[in-house]
Image: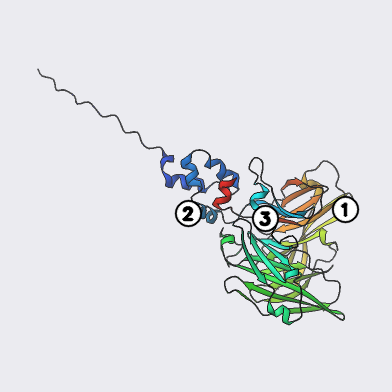
Amino acid sequence: MSHRRRRPSSPPQVPAHPLEDDALLHDILLRLPPQPPYLLRASIVSKRWRRLATDPKFLRRFRLHHGKPPLLGDFSYEVGSFSFRSTLDPPYRIPHSRLSLRPDGSEGWACLDCRHGRILFDDCRRRRVIVWDPITDDRRVLAYPQQFRDSGIVQIHSGAVLCAADDQGHVHGACHSSPFKLVGLSVCHHNDVDSIFASVYSSETGVWSDLVSTTLPRKGINLLSHSALVGNTLHWLITTNSILEFDLVAQTLAVTKRPLGAPPRHDNVQITRSEDGGVGFAALSGSRYDPCLQMWDRKVDSDGAATWVLRKTVELQKILGLDSMIEKRKASILHYLDDVHAIFLRVNSSVYMVQLESMQSKELFKSIHNCIYRPFTSFWAEKVFLAV
C-alpha cells in the first residue's frame, strides 16, 4: 500500500494591517480635531505618518473637511510692540517668532482689523493700508483710494478685511488663500454734522469702489472700535446709542439703534451674531460686585420694524467658574470673534474666551497690560507645521 507524499503547504498569507493603507490612514487623520497639536502628534509617530500628515493635498482636504479654522492665538500691542501670542496648550504653543511682523517700517502702523486669516493695518503717514497674511507672510500694500483724496479725506479712521468667498459663514477652510475685500471708513466733521464715508477694495479687480456715505448729528463718533461681521453686513459701534452698518452686497451705509438700557461704555458692549443668525448684542451689566452678561437679539417684524429683545442674563462669576467675587469695573469685553462665535473678556489680569452657544469659558492667559486685542484663527501652512 503506497502513501502519497503531501506537498509542503505554503505559510498562510498575513493580511496587511489596515493602517498600511495610505488612503485609509488619510481618512483617519482627516477626522482629527483641527487644532494643530493633533496633527502634530500624529506626524511624530513615524516618517511615513509625517509625510502623510504634511502632504499639501491632504492639508487642503483637512481644511475643507473642518471648514472653520481653529484659534491659534492673538495679536496685540503690549508695551508698544505688536506681537503674536499662542493660546495653544504647552508644549504645542507656536513660538511668537513664527508669526512675527518684520519691523521694516511697520512701527507706526495701526491695526484696524483681523479676520479670516488676515490683518489690516493703516499707515497714515504714507496714506496707505497694508493687508498681511501671517501664515504665508504675504503683504499687499494699497494706497488710499483716489476717491478719498478727491473728497479731501486724509485718513482712514477704521476698516475691515474679510475673505471674498461668498459661502455663508466662511466654512470652506481656505479663507487665507482666497481673494479678499477690505472696507475703509473715514469721518468728516462739518458744522454740526458728521459724514461717514466708505469705499471697498477688491483684490480680484484691484479697484476701490465709489464712495458711499451717510450723515448724522455730531455726537463725537468713535470709529476706533473693531467691526463685527453678521451675514453680509459689517457693524461698528459709533456712539452711545447707535450702530453703523455697511451692507457688503448692496454697498450701503445705515445707522441703527442699540438696545435701550445697555451700558454706554464701549468696553462693556459688543455686537455679536444671535442664535438665529441675525444681529445680537452682548453687554456687561449688573451691580458693582455682581456683574452679569446680557445677550440681546434684534428681531425684525413683517413690516421691517426692528426691536431688541433681552434673551439671556447670566452671572459672570458662574460663567467663568470663579470662587471670588468680580468687581464690575475690572471686567470688560475685548472682542467678538465670528469665526468661533465667542466673546473675549478681561477680568482683572486674565483673558477668557466664552463660547456664546454653550456659555463655556476658558482662561487663555494672564497679562497686566491693557492692550488692543485681536484673536487670530487660521489653518497653518506646511512651513509653519514643520517649524513647530
Residue marked by disc 3: 376
Q: Residues within 10 Å of mark 1 (few under 14, many from 20)?
A: few
Q: Residue at x 10, y 19 (%)?
A: 2
**Mark 2 vs mark 1: in front:** 2
Nearest the viewer among 121 and 91 is 121
Q: Is residue 172 above or below residue 251?
A: above
Tell me the residue at 71%/53% (across/down).
Answer: 83
The answer to whether residue 303 of the structure is visible from this angle is no
Residue highlighted by disc 1: 329
Residue occupied by mark 2? 57
Between the C-alphas of marks 2 and 3, the distance is: 24 Å
Q: Position of residue 293 (x, y in %)?
A: 80, 54
Could you tell me which residue is drawn at 67 percent across and 66 percent down? 130
Image vertical order of residue 84 relative to residue 258, above or below: above
Which comes before the other along the chain, label 2 or label 1?
Answer: 2
Reading the chain from its start, which is encountered first: label 2 or label 3?
Answer: 2
Tag 2 and tag 1, C-beta contact below 8 Å: no
Amino acid type assigned to the residue bearing label 2 in the image? Lys
The picture places residue 332, in percent across and down from the top left corner, at 82, 55
Separation of residues labelled 2 and 1 (CA atoms): 50 Å
